[in-house]
Amino acid sequence: MREKNQIREAIQSGKTILGIELGSTRIKAVLIDEDRSPVAAGSFEWENQYVDHIWTYSLEDVWKGLQGCYRDLAENVEKEYGVKLTRLAAAGISAMMHGYLAFDENDTLLVPFRTWRNTITGEAAAKLSALFNYNIPQRWSIAHLYQAILNGEEHVDRVRFITTLAGYVHWKLTGQKVIGNGDASGMFPIDPATKDYNARMIGQFEELVAEKGFSWKLRDILPKSLLAGEDVGTLTEEGAKLLDPSGNLEAGIPMCPPEGDAGTGMAATNSVAVRTGNVSAGTSVFAMAVLEKELTKPYEEIDLVTTPAGDPVAMVHCNNCTSDLNAWVGLFKEFADCMGMDADMNRIFGTLYNKALEGDADCGGLLAYNYFSGEPVTGFDEGRPLFVRSAESRFNLANFMRVHLYTSLGALTSGMDILLKKENIKLDKMMGHGGLFKTKGVGQRILAGAINTPVCVMETAGEGGAWGIALLADYMVSRDEGESLTDFLANKVFAGTAGEEMDPVEADVKGYEAFMERYKKGLAVERAAVESGI
């Protein structure tokens, strides 16, 4: 870590790099120096809305959040280093993958943003998966577009551009309708050979919808897909004012390809090489495994996406992870407040998470489901958070917290079992990052037991995708000629930073397997709750 005056000089001379990621509940900005260490951060809390049966964020909230996040960062820079943030060496934007942002010829949003959390495209996803012989998840942009076609939505003929949230923000900041390869792979399948949209499947889609006579072609309305390190323009004068209305931020900053949170998670955990993988656990949870070879067949539970450099990745994505867990922790916080206790959320989280490790390995017979929304991996278009116990269950605080930590990974392990047990893919270790791992050793141990694989968590795990996109921006401007992203991360970013690795505990593995047997049987209870309409 550099001395404070060195960091101040780097900020003043425009040598720092900015990464911003729009997550599900928080927008975060990270500023890194020439050592690639975070030197300042900013954040803005936000939340999606459920409007007319659609999970969405308004574009007004997007910009309110981005400006608030950047303002928080700039204020923290000035407070800590006594200088204004005006110049940058590079910057990058990341956001939640997937979803549907559709614009007309006047760049007007045609329908409210449909996020990854929606499970309203089942018919389209099934038909496209069959047509392509390739799993198309409900979250993907092409599934949203085709479902709108099947629904006969009047806006479809007027579509001139579709993109993701990261692609949208980058477009408004730079004027460039582009997207990083990893984010693009959550819009439409990528051909590993060309590292571009799959031409055969684009042709199949065009034939499928030809009778509709639309005034557009699919390739023309998709953003251009780019690999990590490629040039995608600079921050415009309008973009600078949009991000920083104070006018302090200068235009002309090089911007890297916008990426999805999966790609930035891979960068932030040094998981872009084959036989590496990572689990990102927050509001949603997903596991990524960089493949040595293709899978033997398509699976509904497995997405095939890419690294930011275009290499194939098997992805298990689940809509639900910590939302229900956080809600229960919030309830304990409310109780503490009622009792007049002075306990902040970090202390409450730490206390309750560590208490879980005192519980029975199988959670004492307790069962819970964290389905705030639908969970396609286990076949649910709608969800209900549930906690279930029998009279014989060992109901105590430790088991209660343990079962909610276990169930946050329940749907994920359903998919991981396919990769590890059916496809026999090999992973040297999994990297963990995101909110589930902030309490040291707890989420890491739970995950290691759940997938029976060593799990490594680095000190930078809490930095997450904002740091990851900053690293991708740094790669664009400072890599050596011909240097791969894998080598850049291994040799220049993570050299000597192995992190803390934890092997699975045998009792945890057996206990989690017992929990999962109960989890699978109890899905009938979850289904009954959904079907009853309560």
Image: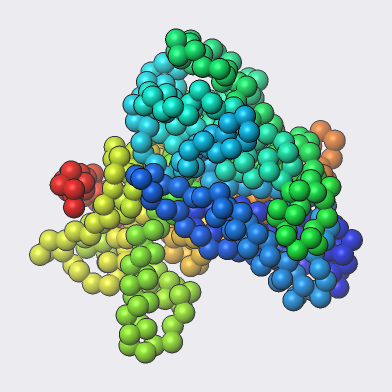
Q: Is residue 381 left or right of residue 481?
A: left
Q: Is residue 505 visible?
A: no
Percent across and percent down for residue 190 are 57, 25
Q: Is residue 482 left or right of residue 367?
A: right
Looking at the rendered image, the quarter that the N terminus falls into is bottom right
Q: Which residue lies at the image location 60% right of the left edge and 58% below the top edge?
A: 64
Percent across and percent down for residue 417 are 37, 39
Toward the viewer: 500 or 288?
Answer: 288
Q: Is residue 244 visible?
A: yes
Q: Which residue lies at the image location 45% right of the left edge and 17% below the top edge?
A: 132
Say which quarter of the image contains residue 125.
Answer: top left
Taking 161 as reference, is 449 above or below it?
A: below
Taking 186 as reference, is 322 above or below it?
A: below
Percent across and percent down for residue 399 are 27, 66
Taking 178 as reference, is 399 above or below it?
A: below
Q: Is residue 155 left or right of residue 178?
A: left
Toward the viewer: 349 or 534?
Answer: 534
